[in-house]
Image (cartoon, rainbow, N blue to C red):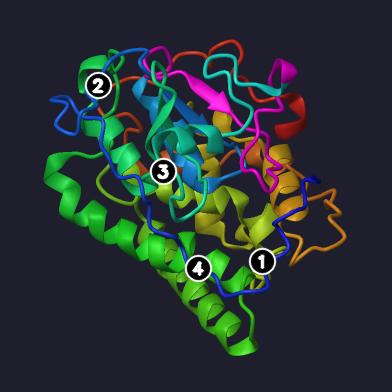
């Protein structure tokens, strides 16, 4: 079975984000039957996927690398789902499976919604616990606190949650989902509506960030993580591949400086693999890009240029500290970095 089987529908039907089917939560009190426990679970992610990248960034910022080991899937999935072909013998070395779908099947047969990342798998049983991409990062920030590193930031501070939730909902509808609605549109009207909403929201976000370093408060929060994972992909894939080309991110002075500031903050850019991102979108979405040709650009050197956002004040980690060095084995290969 080739790695294009099952992917030709991308771009041939209107986009609709599936709700997560497996919504069990891993909590401090284990009320869903899944207590927080160091080493018990495995986070399966793709560096290509913006939804999975949220979890990878949160995990690193909070210092959960040892408590929640990471499996990185091949950016090119096939009809059998995300593959572990980056690992020796094509199997995840801990779970012993070739495809993430095997963990899904171990949990439930004939499940709706397909196989998605991020996914957290219970290592002893090999069963999927959750694929609830909206809740996973919130729980990492609030339920896993006993396992956070010393100096971990508060990514979802209680006093700011209403404002964070409001911003995240707007970003989710118009930006995170908006680029997909535009890219997978099947008629001109559908595309234009999504594109107009996307750029109107980006303009509002640019205005909001013109005189403040972060979206909510003076530190990095969950809201920044969720916006970053779309913005970091914008010029590389959304602008051309998804036809979100009213302007490039590099052409908006505020947003370009904001996303560079985050990219250069430990825990953000050191999780980003531009090679995985480009190969996934351009090779998997064959309904949009039937030739599967991956573009050479854009030039990545700008990501490391000064942003001067520190002049706005703000403290990236609040009263905490930056995460330590990237663990050996989790470093992004040179091909994916500026």
SS at mark 2 in the image: loop
> Is residue 214 shown left or right of residue 247?
left
What label does residue 178 carry, if any? 4
Residue 70 included in the magenta stretch of the image: yes
Nearer the N terminus, badge 3 or badge 2?
A: 2
Q: Marks 1 and 2, Cα distance to the nearest angstrom?
A: 39 Å
Q: Marks 4 and 1, Cα distance to the nearest angstrom?
A: 10 Å
Query: How many C-alpha atoms fall within 10 Å of the one at disc 1: few (<14), some, or many (≥20)?
Result: many
What label does residue 36 carry, if any? 2
- Closer to the observer: label 4 or label 2? 2
- Closer to the observer: label 1 or label 2? 2
Q: Are marks 4 and 1 in contact (CB under 8 Å)?
A: no
Q: Which residue is mark 3?
A: 225
Q: Marks 1 and 3, Cα distance to the nearest angstrom?
A: 21 Å
Q: Which residues are magenta?
A: 64-89
Q: Which residue is mark 1?
A: 242
């Amino acid at each position: 079975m080739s790695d294009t089987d099952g992917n030709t529908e991308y771009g041939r039907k209107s986009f609709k984000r599936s709700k997560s089917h497996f919504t069990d939560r891993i909590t401090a009190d284990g009320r869903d039957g899944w207590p927080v426990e160091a080493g018990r679970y495995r986070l399966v992610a793709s560096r290509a996927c913006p939804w999975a990248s949220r979890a990878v960034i949160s995990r690193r910022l909070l210092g959960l690398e040892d408590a929640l080991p990471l499996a990185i899937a091949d950016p090119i999935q096939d009809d059998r789902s995300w593959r572990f072909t980056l690992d020796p013998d094509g199997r995840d070395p801990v779970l012993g499976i070739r495809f993430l779908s095997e963990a899904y099947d171990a949990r439930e047969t004939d499940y709706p919604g397909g196989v998605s990342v991020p996914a957290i798998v219970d290592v002893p049983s090999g069963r999927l616990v959750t694929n609830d991409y909206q809740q996973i990062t919130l729980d990492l920030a609030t339920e896993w606190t006993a396992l956070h590193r010393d100096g971990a930031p508060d990514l979802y501070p209680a006093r700011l949650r209403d404002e964070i939730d409001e911003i995240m909902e707007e970003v989710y509808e118009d930006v995170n989902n908006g680029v997909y609605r535009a890219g997978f549109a099947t008629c001109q009207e559908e595309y234009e509506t999504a594109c107009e909403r996307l750029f109107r929201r980006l303009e509002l976000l640019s205005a909001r960030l013109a005189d403040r370093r972060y979206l909510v408060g003076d530190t990095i929060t969950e809201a920044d993580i969720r916006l970053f994972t779309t913005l970091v992909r914008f010029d590389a894939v959304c602008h051309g591949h998804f036809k979100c080309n009213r302007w490039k991110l590099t052409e908006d002075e505020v947003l370009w400086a904001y996303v560079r500031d985050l990219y250069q903050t430990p825990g953000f850019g050191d999780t980003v693999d531009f090679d995985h991102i480009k190969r996934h979108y351009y090779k998997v979405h064959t309904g949009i890009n039937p030739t599967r040709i991956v573009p050479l650009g854009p030039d990545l050197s700008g990501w490391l240029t000064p942003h001067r956002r520190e002049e706005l004040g703000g403290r990236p980690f609040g009263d905490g500290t930056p995460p330590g060095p990237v663990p050996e084995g989790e470093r992004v290969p040179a091909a994916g970095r500026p």
